[in-house]
Amino acid sequence: MSMMYEGALQDLVEEFGKLPGIGPKSAQRLAFHILQSPDEEVTALASALAEVKKRVKFCEVCGNVAEDAQCVVCKDPRRDRSIICVVEEPKDVIAIERTREYRGLYHVLGGSIDPMAGVGPDDLRIKELMPRLQDAEVTECVIATDPNLEGEATATYLVRLLGALGITVSRLASGLPVGGDLEYADEVTLGRAFEGRRAVS
Amino acid sequence: MSMMYEGALQDLVEEFGKLPGIGPKSAQRLAFHILQSPDEEVTALASALAEVKKRVKFCEVCGNVAEDAQCVVCKDPRRDRSIICVVEEPKDVIAIERTREYRGLYHVLGGSIDPMAGVGPDDLRIKELMPRLQDAEVTECVIATDPNLEGEATATYLVRLLGALGITVSRLASGLPVGGDLEYADEVTLGRAFEGRRAVS
C-alpha cells in the first residue's frame, strides 16, 4: 500500500503492518481504531509494550518467560522436582499449565529441529537440558513437542539422546481430540488412536 | 483466556486483545513477537501510537484526518474546488485518492444512516455539508457512500436533500467489479450491471 496518510497516521499503519498476521487492511483498521480510542487506552497499550521489553526475561533454569532470574514455575516450592516436561516454546508451558494436570517442572527448547529452516539440535536448549536430567532427584522426562513433522523429529532425537540416562522418558498420548467428530479426524490421528487403544472392561 | 502469564506479558496480551479483530490467540502471538523483537522496533511502535494521539486531528473543513487545521486535500491549491465527493469515512478518501481519478474535494460524513444502530442524519456531518455546497464555486456533488444497505439509505436521503440546491448530484456507477468472474457476481450487482449497460458501438 502506497504512502497515502499524513505523517503520524501513516507511521502507525506501517508499524502495525510489521506485526505478524497483520496485513495492510488490518493495519489501517487498527490505526483508525487507535485514532478514535480514548487517550488512556492508547497510553495503556504503549506502556504495556515498553514494560514487556523492560521487565520480561527468560528463566535461567528452564527458559520459560520470567520477570525474575527464575520463572514462576521454577520458583514455586510446591512443584514436583522429579519430573521435567520438555516443550518447544513458552506458550506451550501456558497451554499445559491451563490443564492443571501437571505439577512438575518444564524445559523450554526454544524451537524444534527443522533442517529446512537451518535449525539443528545445537540451536536448541538441549545442552542446558542434560545436566538438569542428570540431577539425582529427576526420575522422568516427558517429551511434549508439537505433534507435527519438526516436533516429531525433535522428540525422536531426544528419545535417542536420553535413552542412556536411566530415567523414564515418556511422550504425550496421541489420539482423537476430545469434543471432535471421529469422521473428521485425519487418518494419522485415527491410526494413532487405534494403536493407543485401551481395554476398559 | 485466564491469567497465566506473569505481570507485564499478561498486561500486553490483554491490551492487544482489546484491539478490533485480535482474538486471544493472536494477542498471545503478538505479545511473544514483541518480546522477541529488537528494542528499537518496539519503541517505534509505542511512539507511533503516542504520536497519532498527539498529532492527528480531523480537518475543520471536510472531516478527513489532518495534522493541521485542514487536511492535505483541502490545503492543496491544485484541487478542483467545484466538485465535492461525499464519503462515509476517512479511509474512503484514501481509497478514492488511490485511484488517481478524482481531483476535487471531499466531505466525510463520519458514518452512514443506520436506524438499527441509532444513527440518524443529525449524527452525521450533513449540516456542515450544506453551506459548502451553497458556495457559488461548487457545481457538482458526488455521493460515494458504501454500496450496502446503510450507504444506500444515506445516499437516498442526500439525493432528496440536495435536489433543491441547483447543482449536479451524481452517484458512483454500480456494476461488475473489474477482475471478478461474472458467474460469481451476486444478482443485485449483476442486475445493476445490466441496468447501467452502455452502448459501445
Image (cartoon, coloured by chain):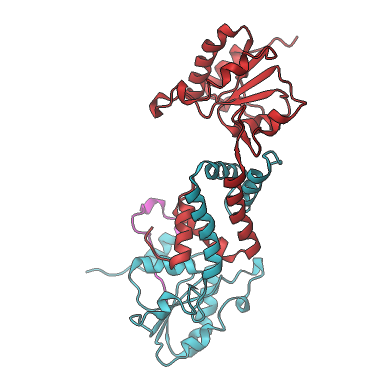
Chain colours: A cyan, B red
Q: Is residue A184 magenta?
A: yes
Magenta-drawn stretch, dominant element (helix, strand or loop): loop
Looking at the image, can residue B40 be seen?
Answer: yes
Residue projecting furthest to the left: A201
Please identify the quarter of the rendering in which residue A168 is found.
bottom left
A158 versus A13 height, above or below? below
Instruction: Classify the position of the N terminus of chain B by image quarter.
Output: bottom left
Q: Position of residue A88 (x, y in %)?
A: 51, 70
Residue projecting furthest to the bottom: A136
Q: Nearer the viewer, residue A30 or A195?
A: A30
A195 versus A34 height, above or below? below
Looking at the image, can residue A188 be seen?
Answer: no
Q: Position of residue A3 (x, y in %)?
A: 71, 41
The residue drawn where x is 47% and y is 23% is: B149
The residue drawn where x is 53% and y is 21% is: B126
The residue drawn where x is 62% and y is 76% is: A123
Q: Is residue B14 magenta?
A: no
Would residue A109 be found to the left or right of residue B103 on screen? left
Please identify the quarter of the rendering in which residue B144 is found.
top right
Q: Nearer the viewer, residue B53 or A51?
A: B53
Q: Nearer the viewer, residue B134 or A139?
A: B134
Instruction: Classify the position of the C terminus of chain B by image quarter.
Output: top right
Q: Position of residue B52 (x, y in %)?
A: 60, 46
Q: How many marks?
A: 0
Q: Position of residue B152 (x, y in %)?
A: 51, 20
Residue projecting furthest to the front: B69
Please identify the quarter of the rendering in which residue B131 is found.
top right
Q: Which residues are magenta?
A: A170-187
A174 versus B188 height, above or below? below
B53 versus B96 height, above or below? below
